[in-house]
Amino acid sequence: MKLLVINGPNINMLGLREPAIYGHENYETLQKLVRETCQAEGIEVELFQSNHEGVIVDRIQAAYGCVDGIVINPAAYTHTSIAILDALKAVALPAVEVHISDVKAREAFRQISYAGMACIKTYMGLGLEGYRQAILYLKEYLSK
Ligand code: DQA
């Protein structure tokens, strides 16, 4: 089983970025958590982060036929990007959406998730633990 974990804009700034909202752990720690979770579960994983919408679309398209599932935190593009939604729909791979913060309890402009419309499950407000939950959920889903 192979998973692709995609993170969108400013996730590389974790730790520095609004720690009251996103916590003190940095992107290195997030990558370590993902790699260790996947190793423990016998899953092959690739991590990808970009601040650019089209680059994320390209990466989703390139995943077709190469991975079994996608974990995605599109960050701010969650709330704006129909292109990312369409890319997820195009490849039709099972995808799980993750948000570090509880977006439902935040600003009105964060209340819509386009990417979420192509995802089988969403984890939000769990901090980095959400990525672990998403990986475990996808493993269970793909094993059925
Ligand atoms: C986020 C929530 C988004 O609204 C925000 O733009 C982000 C991070 C989260 O992980 O909580 O960049 O996706």
Image (spheres, helix red, strand yellow):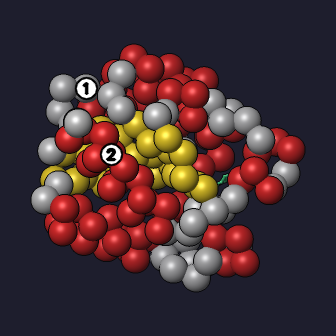
Horizontal side of 46 relative to 49 (left or right) equals left
**Residue 113 occupies quadrant:** top right
Q: Amino acid at mark 2?
A: Leu
Q: CA distance from mark 1 to mark 2?
A: 16 Å
Q: Quadrant of the C terminus?
A: top left
**Residue 21 occupies quadrant:** bottom right
If you read the primary sequence from the N terminus, does the residue marked by circle 1 or circle 2 appear first? 1
Q: Amino acid at mark 1?
A: Tyr
Ligand 1 picture quarter: bottom right
Q: Does residue 132 sit above or below 7 in this rendering?
A: below
Q: Which residue is mark 1?
A: 64
Horizontal side of 142 relative to 13 (left or right) equals left
Q: For the point 61% across and 77% down, which residue is it?
A: 23
Q: For the point 44% across and 42% down, which residue is it?
A: 96
SS at mark 1?
loop
Q: Residues within 10 Å of mark 1 (few under 14, many from 20)?
A: some
**Ligand 1 lies under 8 Å from the Cβ of mark 2:** no
Q: Does residue 59 sit above or below 42 in this rendering?
A: above
Residue 131 in percent (x, y) is at: 43, 60
| Residue at the front extreme of this rendering | 144
